[in-house]
Image (cartoon, coloured by chain):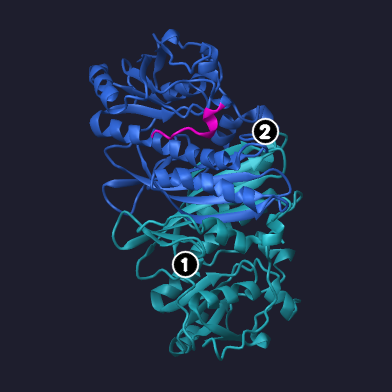
Chain colours: A blue, B cyan
């Protein structure tokens, strides 16, 4: 069987199925970051790796500054999803020997711009040659307080679902200059009990079903309530992907208070109530499109 | 300027020059692993990423099991170089959509085989498509006791230089099935004050000058004493690269005791005194060939 027939999600599930987890591994493959016991008490270590590939995640003629930004920001977005603080980054830059040195320096300038903004230190840089497309792979290590880390699997029937920002149309511009929602996630978990959270990378049509499945519940979404990027249709908001906004669930008792405080704290970033989690038997699993699936 | 004109070492130096290090960064790019302050006292965090690229580090027709072994073992070898304990690994597997699923599973079997041997948990697995050669990128996080980490820069004039194992001829077989010298490095730093250490990845001809330069000293090597793989010439032992043996420096007062204890503890792995570090002014900087330099 070829990779394109299997699809990315099933491939990863099969590949990692036989990896032994130790007792220090709290969350392994399948959530936004891996969560492991750190050497100190009170804090957990978060680990995440992500890559962008020329011809797949970016085009050859795109600004290398923007490509660098995207590569680092994608990885930090997964820390936002868990309410983590990213701290240290390792960068692997793979490029053909005929590539201009200037191009690689612009990539790094983009990487540094995001890293500096979130106080992440780039502590290692590997390079390799390739006879083919360029690849930028970023691994980040950070921490989160034991009582503040949020996974995808804590959603409860009745929880209200929120998303930050607007969805859809990312390919026109936003996929190269989005802001990882780290500050917002940290603010949320300092004040509210967030039951489940993730960042929207493949589109809410693919990502919300994952959060619901991990939590063992169904969901209902008010399609008319979905916050859409100007000019985007509902299907585009659901399926385009690369929104890098936060999707999270919390108790309906907290929802009103959250909305009022959010408007004061983040007046320029919308927060939208889009629906709720439901018991599986009653939840009408709305057909949500498939988001973006790699290898297919 | 193109990458092939600049060369890997100068490229990395230029790329990371402008990366801000925080006060938690103890050793950044340029040593075998990055060393950062961990959340707990007494231990430091070690971070390392490394990759293998089809057509550069492995051939398409080579055993994927061996390729997986190599990808993980290369990274763990950098932990050995610092006397660290690797703990958690993130795996990024980039392959064309037409690649057989079986091939990727064999890669993972190779990765797991090394990881299990050294109690490393694979906690994250990313995959991506590429329209070109396959890439396996591995990032590993681990720890080392504050009083046991060894860098390249602590060598002193007069120190004796040792290497483990045999050098040269790796391409015939060893580059795909070598054993990271983690157990040996941990044993060494538990019993001796190792002044400087690294693993030999580009050949001692390229790597020893790096250790000497980092330590601010010169060196002398007895070429006849170099431990050679059967059938290898002295130039091959110096330049072939991918030995993944340890090179280290310690006080001449400790050398005799080390040799006696080593033979008892590791009777099947040779330990060879190959020369010494020297004051720069007196050290005849022997011409050592150039090892293997990427992008050139």
x, y percent for residue A55: 67, 35
Decide: is A21 above or below B279.
above
Q: Quadrant of the C terminus of chain A?
A: top right
Residue A213: quadrant of the picture: top left
Discs 1/2, front: 1
x, y percent for residue B106: 65, 45
**Which chain does the numbered disc 1 sit on?**
B
The disc label shown at residue A43, or none: none
x, y percent for residue A176: 54, 34
**Which chain does the numbered disc 2 sit on?**
A
x, y percent for residue A94: 63, 49
Magenta residues? A173-181
Q: Nearer the viewer, residue A32 or A29?
A: A32
In the rendered image, residue A156 lying in the magenta stretch gets the answer no
| Circle 2 residue | A3
Q: Nearer the viewer, residue B131 or B64?
A: B131
**Residue drawn at (44%, 86%), measured in percent from left and top?**
B254
In the rendered image, residue A180 lying in the magenta stretch gets the answer yes
Examine the rendering and report whether any part of residue B154 can be seen. yes
**Residue drawn at (39%, 33%), measured in percent from left and top?**
A181
Decide: is A290 above or below A176.
above
Q: Secondary structure at mark 1?
A: loop
Q: Around disc 2, counting alpha carbons within 10 Å, would you say few (fewer than 14), some (14 to 19), or many (20 or more)?
A: many
| Circle 1 residue | B82
Indicate left or right for B206 with A202 as reference.
right
**Residue drawn at (52%, 40%), measured in percent from left and top?**
A69
Magenta-colored segment: predominant secondary structure: loop
Examine the rendering and report whether any part of residue B269 can be seen. no
> Distance of mark 1 from mark 2, alpha carbons?
38 Å
Q: Are marks 1 and 2 in one subunit? A: no
Q: Quadrant of the N terminus of chain A?
A: top right
């Amino acid at each position: 069987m070829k990779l394109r027939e299997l699809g990315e999600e099933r491939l990863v599930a099969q590949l990692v199925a036989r990896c032994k987890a130790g007792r220090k591994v709290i969350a392994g493959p399948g959530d936004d970051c891996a969560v492991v016991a750190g050497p100190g008490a009170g804090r957990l270590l978060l680990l995440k790796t992500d890559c962008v590939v020329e011809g797949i995640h970016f085009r050859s003629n795109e600004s290398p500054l923007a490509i660098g930004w995207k590569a680092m920001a994608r990885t930090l977005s997964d820390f936002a999803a868990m309410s983590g603080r990213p701290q240290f980054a390792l960068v692997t830059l793979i490029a053909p020997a005929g590539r201009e040195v200037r191009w690689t320096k612009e990539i790094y300038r983009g990487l540094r711009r995001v890293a500096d903004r979130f106080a992440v230190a780039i502590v290692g840089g590997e390079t390799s040659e390739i006879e083919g497309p360029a690849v930028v792979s970023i691994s980040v290590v950070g921490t989160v307080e034991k009582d503040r880390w949020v996974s995808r699997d804590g959603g409860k029937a009745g929880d209200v679902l929120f998303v930050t920002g607007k969805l859809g149309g990312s390919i026109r511009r936003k996929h190269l200059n989005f802001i990882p929602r780290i500050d917002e996630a940290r603010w949320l978990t300092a004040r509210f009990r967030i039951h489940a959270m993730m960042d929207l990378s493949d589109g809410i049509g693919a990502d919300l079903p994952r959060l619901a499945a991990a939590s063992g519940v169904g969901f209902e979404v008010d399609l008319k309530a979905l916050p859409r990027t100007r000019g985007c249709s509902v299907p585009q908001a659901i399926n385009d992907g690369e929104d890098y906004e936060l999707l999270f669930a919390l108790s309906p008792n907290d929802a009103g208070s959250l909305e009022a405080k959010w408007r004061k704290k983040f007046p320029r970033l919308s927060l939208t109530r889009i629906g709720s989690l439901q018991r599986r038997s009653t939840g009408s699993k709305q057909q949500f499109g498939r988001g973006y699936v790699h290898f297919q």
